[in-house]
Amino acid sequence: MTAPMPLPRRATSRLNDLLIAPGATRMERWLSYLTAVVGAGVAAAIGVAAGYPSPVVVVLAVLGFDIFGGAVVNATASVSRRFHTGVTAARRQVFFVAAHVHLPVLALILPAYPWSTAITLYAGTLAAAVLVATAAPMSKRPLAFAAASGLLVAAVTLLPAPPALAWLAPLLILKLLLGHLLPGPRAT
């Protein structure tokens, strides 16, 4: 049996550009993928321990890969350069948050995850994204932290969610509001 051929450099570069950002450093790529793989494993293990059917465990693994890895990716300088520069930066940031329909999808495929929780947290996160993305530069950071604080409290104390899925909303809020919407150290 022969060893599999490595992907051509061009294909891996395109994958890195898509999943992380163009110009991502070796450390950014390594830490992002490591965290994503660990997140997928943790999410799948939680799903198995909760007794969820295999298709739901697979969805949880994909969500874990995206949310855990994305929390790290969104904190990188390369992603900051990608989303925090140019005249359409605010629009790109809001569209990115809007595309994260993870919680409504989870409510759709898993009746144990309440629609009320999914819609409230999705709408709250999207509203916060609009406020933060369109705010004056000096207001972005405190607004993002204020919104994240409120949504995190709501997610873990006020809104119902199965214990095995209680990690999803808080990590998604951190990924989107504190990671994605706040520019990194080299956003200029």
Image: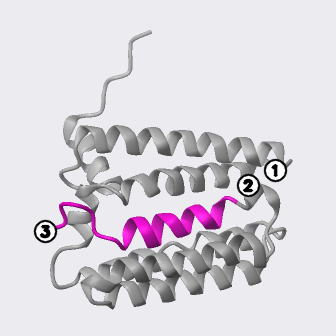
Q: Which residues are magenta?
A: 167-188
Question: Residue 167 location in percent, x, y?
Answer: 67, 58
Q: Disc 3 to disc 2, how far (Cα)?
A: 41 Å
| In this view, the mark in front (1 or 3) | 3
89 on left or right of 75: left
Q: Residue 147 magenta-drawn?
A: no
Classed neighbour count for the residue bearing mark 1: other residues with Cα under 10 Å, few (<14), some (14–19), many (≥20):
few
| Label 2 sits on residue | 56
136 on left or right of 110: left
Q: Amino acid at mark 3?
A: Thr
Q: Secondary structure at mark 1?
A: loop
Callouts 1 and 2 close, C-beta under 8 Å: yes
Q: Secondary structure at mark 3?
A: loop
Q: Disc 1 to disc 3, how far (Cα)?
A: 46 Å
Question: Residue 90 location in percent, x, y?
Answer: 29, 84
Residue at point 81%, 50% (across, down): 53
184 on left or right of 62: left
Residue at point 42%, 83% (across, down): 143
Which part of the image, by quadrant, shows the N terminus? top left
Q: Amino acid at mark 2?
A: Val
Disc on res. 188: 3
| Label 1 sits on residue | 53
Question: Residue 28 location in percent, x, y?
Answer: 30, 45
30 on left or right of 109: left
Residue at point 82%, 63% (across, down): 162
Q: Amino acid at mark 1?
A: Pro
Out of 152 and 108, give the one closest to the viewer.
152
Which part of the image, by quadrant, shows the C terminus? bottom left
Q: Earlier in the sequence, mark 1 or mark 3?
A: 1
Q: Note whether 119 is above or below 45 in the view shown.
A: below
Callouts 1 and 3 close, C-beta under 8 Å: no
Q: Earlier in the sequence, mark 3 or mark 2?
A: 2
